[in-house]
């Protein structure tokens, strides 16, 4: 755990695999997770509408097991947003959200 999903417009200013690697490393650098437990993937969108002045987007959704403090989740969110700022133009819409997963209902094999 965690599951990191990067949703983005097709015309990234960085290669998608490189973005996945950078975000994956940023999650590890947070100190909240073991490297072997982080799962990161990206989904490109061809069809979307954005606010005025925006020509692309990246949104990171991080699903983590419930139990982290608000401060830990804020730190992770800021770390991921800072990672995106490093590789993206100002004309990109950037966002991050941390989602708590319920251990009582989450299953994996």
Image (cartoon, rainbow, N blue to C red):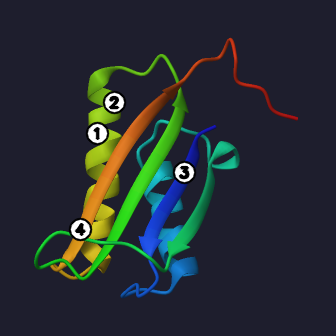
Using the rendered view, name the quadrant where residue 87 is placed.
bottom left
Return the disc, 1 or 3, that comes first in the chain's sequence: 3
The residue under label 4 is 93
Looking at the rendered image, the disc whose residue lies closer to the viewer, 4 or 1, is: 4
Looking at the rendered image, the disc whose residue lies closer to the viewer, 4 or 3, is: 4
Residues at discs 3 and 2 in contact (Cβ within 8 Å): no
Q: Quadrant of the C terminus?
A: top right
- Seen as rendered, the residue at the extreme top is 104
- Seen as rendered, the residue at the extreme left is 53
Q: Examine the rendered structure and indicate whether residue 56 appears above or below residue 59.
A: below
The residue under label 1 is 75
Looking at the rendered image, the disc whose residue lies closer to the viewer, 3 or 2, is: 3
Residues at discs 1 and 3 in contact (Cβ within 8 Å): no
Query: Residue, x 58% and y 40% (percent of image)?
Result: 2
| Residue 65 spot, x, y in % from top left | 56, 25
Return the disc, 4 or 1, that comes first in the chain's sequence: 1
Label placed on residue 72: 2
Q: In this view, does 66 lie to the left or right of 75?
A: right
| Residue 88 spot, x, y in % from top left | 28, 79
The residue under label 3 is 4
Residues at discs 1 and 2 in contact (Cβ within 8 Å): yes
Separation of marks 2 and 4 at Cα, in angstroms: 24 Å
Return the disc, 2 or 4, that comes first in the chain's sequence: 2
Disc 3, SS: strand
């Amino acid at each position: 755990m965690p599951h990191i999903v990067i949703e983005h417009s097709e015309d990234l200013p960085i290669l998608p695999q490189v973005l996945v690697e950078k975000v994956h490393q940023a999650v590890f650098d947070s100190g909240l997770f073991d490297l072997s437990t982080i799962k990161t993937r990206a989904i490109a969108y061809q069809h979307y509408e954005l606010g005025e002045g925006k020509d692309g987007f990246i949104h990171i959704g991080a699903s983590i097991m419930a139990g982290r403090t608000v401060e830990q989740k804020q730190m992770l969110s800021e770390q991921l947003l800072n990672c995106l700022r490093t590789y993206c133009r100002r004309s990109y819409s950037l966002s991050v959200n941390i989602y708590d997963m319920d251990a009582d209902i989450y299953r994996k094999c």
